[in-house]
């Protein structure tokens, strides 16, 4: 793959990954009470604080990933956040059989996203990024 195609693919990959986090973070702001309730429903302490932290991680991490500034660190932070959220909220192995299929799908989707984030952490943001300027 030539460098133009590689840089375009890296930008497209970063954009698609970042979109998921930016949309989720923005959605949490609009539905903050629901997010707090969902976090509290799994027994985590300080759900308001955790919801606010999730908004910050998703919006800041997503923005950094999108523009490609400190992209390796942003990708690592988002990967850790995604794994943690998956284990806490998509723990299909502990759910009733009727819920397992969808939750397993969500869990595996998140693991695939984590894989993409780890690729950014390992290989960098690509040539069309603030990191490369």
Image: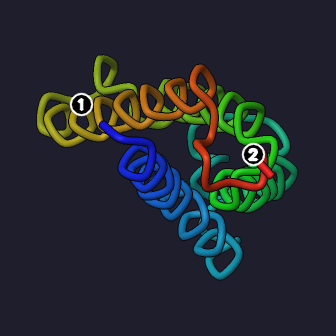
Secondary structure at badge 1 equals: helix
Marks 2, 1: nearer the viewer? 2
Picture disc at residue 104:
1
Which of the 4 image quadrants contains residue 24? Answer: bottom right
Identify whether 107 is placed above or below 131: above
> In this rendering, does residue 36 appear at all?
no
Identify whether 19 is placed above or below 125: below
User: What's the residue at 61%, 55% (across, down)?
Assistant: 128
Q: Nearer the viewer, residue 77 or 126?
A: 126
Report the side of 77 relative to 118 (left or right).
right
Q: Position of residue 105 (x, y in %)?
A: 21, 37
Identify the residue under disc 2.
Answer: 132
Q: Which badge, 2 or 1, comes first in the chain's sequence?
A: 1
Which of the 4 image quadrants contains residue 60? Answer: bottom right
Q: Position of residue 100 (x, y in %)?
A: 19, 31
User: What's the residue at 73%, 40% (across, down)?
Assistant: 74
How far apart in space, not on screen, are marks 2 and 1 (Cα)?
37 Å
User: What's the residue at 44%, 33% (across, down)?
Assistant: 116
Q: Quadrant of the N terminus?
A: top left
């Amino acid at each position: 793959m030539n460098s133009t195609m590689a840089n375009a693919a890296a930008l497209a990959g970063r954009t698609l990954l970042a979109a998921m986090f930016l949309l989720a973070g923005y959605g949490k702001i609009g539905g903050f009470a629901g997010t707090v309730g969902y976090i509290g429903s799994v027994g985590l302490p300080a759900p308001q604080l955790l919801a606010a932290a999730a908004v910050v991680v998703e919006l800041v991490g997503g923005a950094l990933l999108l523009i490609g500034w400190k992209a390796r660190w942003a990708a690592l932070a988002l990967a850790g956040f995604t794994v943690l959220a998956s284990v806490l909220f998509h723990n299909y192995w502990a759910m009733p059989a009727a819920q397992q299929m969808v939750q397993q799908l969500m869990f595996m989707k998140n693991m695939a996203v984590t894989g993409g984030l780890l690729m950014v952490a390992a290989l960098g943001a690509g040539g069309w990024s603030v990191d490369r300027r």
